[in-house]
Image (tube, rainbow, N blue to C red):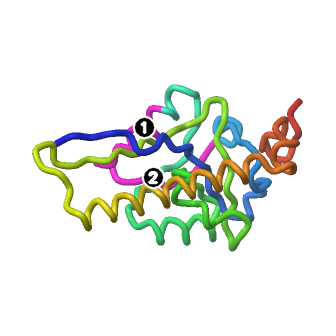
Amino acid sequence: MKSRLLLRDREMLLSGRQRGLTPLAQVQLADCAPLKIVVPGAQNVRRRNLETYFQTHGVEVAAMLEMDAMIGTLEFVARSDWVTVLPSLICINDIGKGDLVVNPIVKPTLRAEFVIIQPARRTLGALARRFLECFESQVANIHGAWERVLAMPAVANDRRRQNTGGRLRG
Protein backbone atom coordinates (compact mmCIF):
# COMPACT_ATOMS: atom_id res chain seq x y z
CA MET A 1 0.00 0.00 0.00
CA LYS A 2 1.08 3.55 -0.61
CA SER A 3 -0.44 6.71 0.72
CA ARG A 4 -0.27 10.44 0.17
CA LEU A 5 -1.77 13.45 1.87
CA LEU A 6 -4.99 14.66 0.28
CA LEU A 7 -5.75 17.52 2.65
CA ARG A 8 -4.91 18.89 6.07
CA ASP A 9 -8.38 20.15 6.92
CA ARG A 10 -9.45 22.64 9.55
CA GLU A 11 -11.83 21.34 12.22
CA MET A 12 -14.94 23.38 13.05
CA LEU A 13 -17.17 23.63 16.10
CA LEU A 14 -20.82 22.96 15.30
CA SER A 15 -23.56 23.97 17.72
CA GLY A 16 -27.26 24.67 17.74
CA ARG A 17 -28.46 28.26 17.39
CA GLN A 18 -29.70 28.24 20.99
CA ARG A 19 -26.08 28.15 22.21
CA GLY A 20 -25.77 31.76 21.00
CA LEU A 21 -22.48 31.62 19.11
CA THR A 22 -21.96 34.04 16.23
CA PRO A 23 -21.81 32.09 12.96
CA LEU A 24 -18.29 31.88 11.47
CA ALA A 25 -16.70 33.82 14.35
CA GLN A 26 -13.52 32.18 15.58
CA VAL A 27 -13.79 30.20 18.80
CA GLN A 28 -11.29 29.06 21.34
CA LEU A 29 -12.67 25.81 22.74
CA ALA A 30 -11.33 26.49 26.23
CA ASP A 31 -13.46 29.68 26.28
CA CYS A 32 -16.61 27.72 25.34
CA ALA A 33 -16.14 25.21 28.15
CA PRO A 34 -17.43 23.30 29.91
CA LEU A 35 -18.47 21.48 26.76
CA LYS A 36 -21.11 18.84 26.35
CA ILE A 37 -19.68 17.28 23.23
CA VAL A 38 -20.64 14.53 20.80
CA VAL A 39 -17.58 12.58 19.62
CA PRO A 40 -16.96 9.64 17.28
CA GLY A 41 -16.32 6.13 18.59
CA ALA A 42 -13.07 5.20 20.33
CA GLN A 43 -11.75 3.38 17.25
CA ASN A 44 -11.93 6.59 15.19
CA VAL A 45 -8.58 8.43 15.02
CA ARG A 46 -10.42 11.76 15.22
CA ARG A 47 -11.68 10.78 18.68
CA ARG A 48 -8.12 10.31 19.95
CA ASN A 49 -7.08 13.60 18.35
CA LEU A 50 -9.98 15.43 20.01
CA GLU A 51 -9.25 13.97 23.44
CA THR A 52 -5.56 14.86 23.11
CA TYR A 53 -6.50 18.41 22.05
CA PHE A 54 -8.86 18.81 25.03
CA GLN A 55 -6.23 17.60 27.51
CA THR A 56 -3.35 19.54 25.97
CA HIS A 57 -5.20 22.84 25.69
CA GLY A 58 -7.22 22.85 28.90
CA VAL A 59 -10.64 22.35 27.33
CA GLU A 60 -13.04 21.36 30.10
CA VAL A 61 -15.50 18.68 29.06
CA ALA A 62 -18.65 18.43 31.18
CA ALA A 63 -20.06 15.45 29.29
CA MET A 64 -19.10 13.34 26.31
CA LEU A 65 -21.50 11.35 24.17
CA GLU A 66 -20.21 8.80 21.66
CA MET A 67 -22.18 8.71 18.44
CA ASP A 68 -21.05 7.28 15.10
CA ALA A 69 -24.13 8.26 13.08
CA MET A 70 -23.34 11.57 11.35
CA ILE A 71 -26.94 12.56 10.60
CA GLY A 72 -27.94 11.65 14.16
CA THR A 73 -25.07 13.74 15.54
CA LEU A 74 -26.03 16.78 13.47
CA GLU A 75 -29.73 16.51 14.35
CA PHE A 76 -28.96 16.07 18.06
CA VAL A 77 -26.56 19.04 18.15
CA ALA A 78 -29.00 21.26 16.23
CA ARG A 79 -31.74 20.60 18.80
CA SER A 80 -29.77 20.66 22.03
CA ASP A 81 -27.06 22.53 23.91
CA TRP A 82 -24.49 19.91 22.90
CA VAL A 83 -21.72 20.61 20.36
CA THR A 84 -19.53 18.58 18.04
CA VAL A 85 -16.30 19.11 16.13
CA LEU A 86 -16.14 18.18 12.45
CA PRO A 87 -13.77 18.75 9.52
CA SER A 88 -14.70 21.71 7.35
CA LEU A 89 -15.19 19.34 4.40
CA ILE A 90 -18.19 17.84 6.14
CA CYS A 91 -19.88 21.05 7.27
CA ILE A 92 -19.57 23.31 4.21
CA ASN A 93 -23.31 22.95 3.49
CA ASP A 94 -24.19 24.06 7.03
CA ILE A 95 -22.90 27.62 6.58
CA GLY A 96 -25.79 29.99 7.26
CA LYS A 97 -28.42 27.31 6.79
CA GLY A 98 -30.71 25.41 9.09
CA ASP A 99 -30.27 25.06 12.80
CA LEU A 100 -26.49 24.59 12.97
CA VAL A 101 -23.87 27.26 13.65
CA VAL A 102 -20.35 26.66 12.30
CA ASN A 103 -17.30 28.26 13.94
CA PRO A 104 -13.59 27.91 13.08
CA ILE A 105 -11.52 26.67 16.03
CA VAL A 106 -8.46 28.83 16.84
CA LYS A 107 -5.67 29.18 19.40
CA PRO A 108 -4.67 26.67 18.36
CA THR A 109 -6.40 25.42 15.28
CA LEU A 110 -7.33 21.78 15.18
CA ARG A 111 -6.70 19.86 11.97
CA ALA A 112 -7.70 16.51 10.50
CA GLU A 113 -5.53 14.85 7.89
CA PHE A 114 -7.07 12.96 5.00
CA VAL A 115 -4.93 10.60 2.96
CA ILE A 116 -5.35 8.63 -0.24
CA ILE A 117 -4.40 4.98 0.21
CA GLN A 118 -3.96 2.75 -2.80
CA PRO A 119 -2.18 -0.44 -3.80
CA ALA A 120 1.57 0.03 -4.29
CA ARG A 121 2.08 -2.77 -6.80
CA ARG A 122 -0.63 -2.01 -9.29
CA THR A 123 -1.98 1.08 -10.93
CA LEU A 124 -5.55 2.20 -10.61
CA GLY A 125 -7.88 1.26 -13.43
CA ALA A 126 -9.35 3.97 -15.64
CA LEU A 127 -12.64 4.21 -13.70
CA ALA A 128 -10.88 4.30 -10.33
CA ARG A 129 -8.49 6.99 -11.61
CA ARG A 130 -11.42 9.06 -12.89
CA PHE A 131 -13.28 8.66 -9.60
CA LEU A 132 -10.18 9.76 -7.67
CA GLU A 133 -9.71 12.79 -9.95
CA CYS A 134 -13.36 13.82 -9.44
CA PHE A 135 -13.07 13.27 -5.69
CA GLU A 136 -9.89 15.34 -5.44
CA SER A 137 -11.48 18.09 -7.53
CA GLN A 138 -14.51 18.22 -5.21
CA VAL A 139 -12.29 18.33 -2.12
CA ALA A 140 -10.32 21.21 -3.68
CA ASN A 141 -13.58 23.03 -4.52
CA ILE A 142 -14.84 22.69 -0.95
CA HIS A 143 -11.52 23.80 0.50
CA GLY A 144 -11.54 26.81 -1.85
CA ALA A 145 -15.09 27.68 -0.83
CA TRP A 146 -14.03 27.73 2.83
CA GLU A 147 -11.08 29.99 2.01
CA ARG A 148 -13.46 32.41 0.27
CA VAL A 149 -16.00 32.32 3.12
CA LEU A 150 -13.39 32.92 5.81
CA ALA A 151 -11.85 35.76 3.77
CA MET A 152 -15.18 37.59 3.33
CA PRO A 153 -15.13 41.13 4.76
CA ALA A 154 -17.65 40.36 7.52
CA VAL A 155 -15.52 37.45 8.69
CA ALA A 156 -12.10 39.00 8.00
CA ASN A 157 -13.04 42.22 9.82
CA ASP A 158 -14.08 40.18 12.84
CA ARG A 159 -10.72 38.44 13.28
CA ARG A 160 -10.60 40.01 16.76
CA ARG A 161 -13.98 38.61 17.67
CA GLN A 162 -14.00 35.39 19.56
CA ASN A 163 -17.07 33.64 20.87
CA THR A 164 -16.79 33.93 24.63
CA GLY A 165 -20.38 34.19 25.66
CA GLY A 166 -20.97 37.35 23.63
CA ARG A 167 -17.96 39.35 24.81
CA LEU A 168 -15.67 40.93 22.22
CA ARG A 169 -12.01 40.20 22.75
CA GLY A 170 -9.42 42.80 21.86
In the image, 163 versus 104, the foreground residue is: 104
* Residue located 55% across and 37% down the image: 110
| Residue to which mark 2 is pinned | 39
Q: Is residue 43 magenta?
A: yes
User: Percent position (x, y) of residue 65?
Assistant: 45, 56
User: Percent position (x, y) of residue 96?
Assistant: 73, 66
* Residue located 56% across and 57% down the image: 141
Of discs 1 and 2, which sits in the foreground?
A: 1
Give the extent of the magenta segment.
34-52
Q: Is residue 49 magenta?
A: yes
Q: Is residue 6 left or right of residue 77?
A: left
User: Percent position (x, y) of residue 107?
Assistant: 66, 30
In the image, 153 versus 85, the foreground residue is: 153
* Residue located 60% across and 58% down the image: 82
Q: CA distance from mark 1 to mark 2?
A: 11 Å
Quadrant hosting residue 108: top right
For disc 2, the neighbor class at 10 Å (few under 14, some 14 to 19, many from 20) is many
Kindly identify which numbered label has been placed on residue 49. 1
